[in-house]
Amino acid sequence: MTAIRVAVAAMVLFVLAVCMPATQAATASTARLTYSPGGLLRPGEVVTIRGTDHTECPSKKVDVSAVFSTGGSAGEFPALIGTDLPLSSAGDFVIRYTMENRSLLGGQRFESRCTSYRKDFWTMRMAQAPFDVDRTDTPDDDPPPGAVPGDLASKRIVVRPTSARPGTKVTVWTDIRCGTSNASNDAGLYFGDAFVRAIDARSNAEPRSETLQIPQTPIRGPSRISVSCGDEPNPEDVDGTAVFGADFTVTAPALTLSADRAAPGDRLRAVGAGFTGCADPIDDAPAELALRQGDRVLARFPVARDGRVDAELTVPSGLPAGVAELTAACASERFDGSVRLALSVTPTAKTDGGGERAVGRTVPAAADRAESAVRLPSPGDLLDHRAPLAVAGAGTVLALPLVGFAAELFNQTLAENRLRIRRRLRPGAARPRSLPRAPRLQAVAFVALSAAFTVVVEPDAGLDRSTLALALSLVIAVPLTVLAYSGVAEHYRRRVSRVRAFAHLIPGALVVAVALGVISRSAHLIPGYVYGLFLAFTHAGLRRLPPREDGRAGALGAWSLAGLGLAAWVWRIPVEHVLAGDEHPAFGWILTENVLTQVYIAAVVGLVFGLLPIRFMDGHVLWTWSRSGWAAVYAVAVFLFMLTLLDPTGVATGATEGMWLRSGSVFGAFLLASVAFWAVFRLRPARGPNHPPPSPSPTPSSSTPPPMPRVPPTIGRP
């Protein structure tokens, strides 16, 4: 009896020893699994799954599945969502999953499993989170399987396509044959070593196709998709324990720099694709890609919704000369993997002027693009983030009444103190307006001055190919903007009045252009603010137009310039795509991009500053004629100015602080200038006239009769 008892006890201990790990793992109390949003989940909805306290996993990696029921006798079937997901030091992970269009009838749940126990799929789960689905019929978005592959009979499994990124659906063809009974007619579909789900594999079935959504995984490169009836021999299985597999490649993200050699301070362009995980914001974290050298973050790039990256970076100082090994990966872990890059850092030396220059470096051809053209966002970039659009819209709404109030204050002060201002600035009588001297020469001087001011505000201007392309583009762009604005308005005025006018320079506008150029250069504004509307037409006082006609002429010119600027902005899209994919762009493409860029910048800046409704600007003519007409065109100009020129990087990153700060500075400065102008005359009122002392009354003896007035002879009397 003692021997029997010992044997029974040994058997019990053996069973407990075998079953205890599974029981502990299946009922681990520390691991938790949650998901959001809550409530009914719908096919196509993006679900965020969070795992916490998965500290009992030896491999520090987990698989995540969605387990569902078909409602029949086949039981539960899992669908692999993520595989080889790394855990944080606290045992946490976050994954995003797009719900598939499947017949989820009841008993659904998300489950997490440690990759160390993949063989014990049904018993070794770490945590679970039940969910329910909206059972409303939804259209099936699975790709059509197409015809049966011709090589299926020899390969037994074919995957189409053979490469894709995580989250993409592929078609798996197989003719594997398992058993005939309900208990043995299933085969397992595997992604790598991870179990995806069970598929129907009856021994008498025809070749069949399965749609597989590639699970989220940080592993990129070659992988394998396979099917098998099982590890244990079963007399009913036709194919037994055979495993049929097909090679598959998980598409890796790609990132390239515009040059492989650069010095600190150089501007490079980063272009990439495939960062679909980075594009999904989680917990309000920005969708960004981080470029690192070791633990140092050199730059952060915004990631578009389709996983594309197209951004600029400045090579930071402090990088040692030589080859720098760089790594690009999501700023926060999103399972996109990483891209390794090598950048040859060229040392710098001090120049005679105290600056730095690269030693033995040839400037790459991509640097021939003007900085203003590279920084200007394209229309498609506006769709990446909503915050800059909202801020630009709100800023426009606030700017219109602020500009209107400041302009009215300025105009009223100017009207009330016109004589005082004229005595101070222009003593004596004003000279009558006359026709300009050498109008053609003034037009040439206008083009030259506009080009000079624009080249000066470009940060990398010098005697090189890039500056030459920029200067030539301005010779083309500046006359175009003048013809669009002043030319159209003058054509209307000439047609109405039948009086010809001649072009002449506006000295006051030249002062505005110089001021904007100095501000752009000192504040490092890219693109710089170039004001080119300092060429006007004069008619020597021979033309008299009613305010209505004059206002219509101004409106036609303003809308014509706005249309030209928008057209140039849209036409930049194909040109930018050509230049982005060419490491050695042709001079003609660079010139074309510069022309379109400067036309847009000059149009927007010219409208914002040229249509200020103060008396000596064209905006006052439009303001006097129709304030609603002025507000319509000015709102378009201010919106584009705030969105694309005040803070161009905010459009790509979604940041709005710079836009708020600069817009407040620009329009606040105009308000303060108007208030200061009013305060000068308000606090220093005009002095009363000096009356001469009364002369002594004449005595009767010395009094003489006053002279008789000279009356002109009467004309026409008989």
Image (cartoon, rainbow, N blue to C red):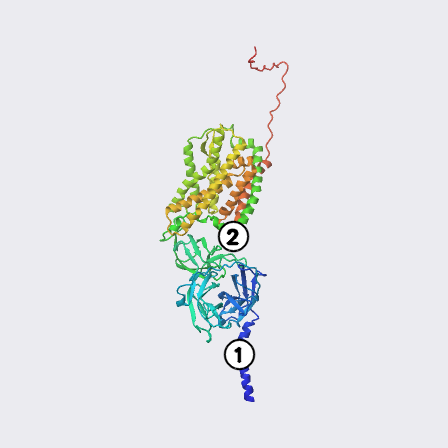
Q: Secondary structure at mark 2?
A: loop
- State the image coordinates of residue 632 (x, y, percent, origin top left): 54, 41
Dot 1 or dot 2: first in sequence order is 1
- State the image coordinates of residue 547 (x, y, percent, origin top left): 54, 32
Please report the residue visible at 44 percent of the width from the left and 39 percent of the height from the top: 480
Q: Looking at the rendered structure, which numbered label has been put on residue 69?
A: none
Circle 1 residues within 10 Å: few <14, some 14–19, many ≥20: few
Q: Can I make out residue 649 in this image?
A: no
Q: Quadrant of the N terminus?
A: bottom right
Label 1 to label 2, Cα distance in Å? 56 Å
- Amino acid carrying label 2: it is His
Which residue is outermost to the front? 204
Please report the residue visible at 55 percent of the width from the left and 82 percent of the height from the top: 12
172, 326: nearer the viewer: 172
Q: Secondary structure at mark 1?
A: helix
Q: Quadrant of the C terminus?
A: top right
412 is higher (above) or lower (below) than 269: above
Which residue is outermost to the top? 718
Q: Can I make out residue 338 in this image?
A: yes
Which residue is outermost to the bottom? 1
- State the image coordinates of residue 277 (x, y, percent, origin top left): 49, 59
Please report the residue visible at 56 percent of the width from the left and 86 percent of the height from the top: 5
- Amino acid carrying label 1: it is Ala
Q: Looking at the rendered structure, which numbered label has been put on residue 17?
A: 1
**Residue 420 occupies quadrant:** top right
**Residue 2 occupies quadrant:** bottom right
392 is higher (above) or lower (below) than 276: above
Which residue in the structure is indicated by mark 2?
Answer: 385
